[in-house]
Image: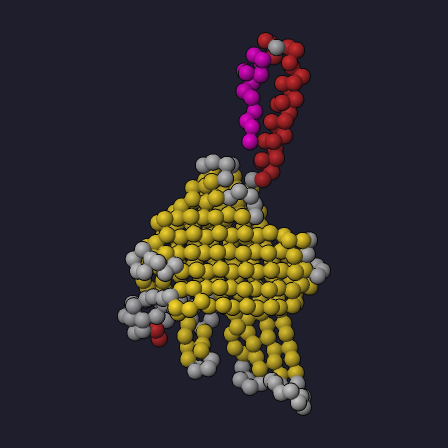
Amino acid sequence: MKKKFLPGIVTMMAVLQVTAQDATVKELQKASTKEVKSTEKDGWKKSGSFILNVNQGSLSNWAGGGEQNTMGINAIFNYGINFRKGKSTWDNYFDLALGFQNATSFNRFRKTDDRIDITSKYGYQVSKHWYAAALVNFNSQALTGYDYGADTKISNFLAPGKLLFSLGMDFRPNNDFSVFISPATTRWILKKDDDFYALNLFGVPAGKKSYNELGAYLTAKYTRPITTWATYTGRLDLFSNYKRNPQNVDVFFTNLLVLKFNKWLGSTISVDLVYDDDVISKLQLKEILGLGLTLKL
C-alpha cells in the first residue's frame, strides 16, 4: 500500500518542477485512492452458513425388508467473525454440528453427529503474506456418546475435550487460504466425566482428568467457491506430541461441499478423517450426505 507524500515534499517538487505538476497530482490521486480502498477492507466481516437436513422413510408390507419407519435430522452451523485494522487481524471461527437418527427397531433417537469446534486467531503482519500469530482452539462434543451395539457410554462433553494454545507464523497469500505453523504448542486433553476417571482413556491416564502435551502444530484452512452454486470448505490439523510418541501425528481433516439449488434449498456432503492413536489406532471416517434447508448467513 503506498503512503501519501508529505506536504513539504509535494511543495518542494511543485517549486522545482512546475512542468511535472500534473503528473504529481495524478500520482497523489492514485495513492489517495489506494488508501481509501485499503481502509474499506478494515473493520468487521461476518459470514457463514446454516444447514438443516431432514430425512424420513416408511415401509409397509415391503417384501425387501427394512426398517418400518425411520427419521433423521442433521444440523451444521459454520460462522466466521473477522476483524482487521491496519496490520492487525483477529479471526474467529465457529464449527458446530449435531445429528440424530431414529428407527423402529431401536425406538429412540441415536446420535449420528456431534461437534463443537471454536478457533480464535490474532495476527500481526510482518511481511506481504506472513503474520506473527497466536491461536487458541477448543473442541469437544455437546451430548453423551454411546457404543449402541453394547449400549455403553464412551464419551461425553469434555470427555474428551481439547484446549490448544499456540504461537507461530500464519501464511495468508489470499482470502481463500491460510496456513498456521507452530513449533511450540501446548494442548490439554480433558476427561471431565467422573464415569471415566478410573480409566485410561483419550490419552489421559487413569486417576486424572486432564493431560498436558507439548508439540508442533499446523492448521490449514481453505474456502473456495467452485461455481456460483457450489462452495468447498476444508481444514487440515496436524499435531505431534514431543512428550509421547512424536512420530504418531494426530490428524484431523474435515471437508464440506455445499451445493445450492436456490436461496433456501441445497445439498451437503461432509467427510471427516481423524487419526489419534491415543483414542484408537485406526483411521476414523465419517461421511454425511444431506438435502434440505441451506442458508447463507
- Left or right: where does residue 139 sit relative to residue 23? left
Question: Is residue 70 visible in the rendered structure shown here?
Answer: yes
* Residue beneath the point at 45% across and 56% down: 237
Q: What is the span of residues highlighted in magenta in the rendered image?
A: 1-13
Quadrant that contains the C terminus = bottom right
Q: On the image, which quarter does residue 132 sit in?
A: top left
Type of colouring: secondary structure
* Residue beneath the point at 40% across and 60% down: 250
Q: On the image, which quarter does residue 104 sit in?
A: bottom right
Magenta stretch contains residue 2: yes
- Left or right: where does residue 209 sit relative to residue 238? left
Q: Position of residue 50 (x, y in %)?
A: 60, 61
Furthest residue in direction right, as rendered:
262
Counting every numbered tag in the picture gives 0
- Left or right: where does residue 49 sit relative to residue 196? right
In front: 224, or 125?
A: 224
In front: 282, or 152?
A: 282
Quadrant that contains the N terminus = top right
Magenta stretch contains residue 188: no
Q: Position of residue 253 (x, y in %)?
A: 49, 60
Please determine whether, in this image, residue 225 is positioned above or below residue 173: below
Q: On the image, which quarter does residue 43 sit in?
A: top right
Q: Position of residue 278 (x, y in %)?
A: 36, 66
Furthest residue in direction front, as rendered:
247
* Residue beneath the point at 42% across and 56% down: 238
* Residue beneath the point at 66% across and 22% down: 26
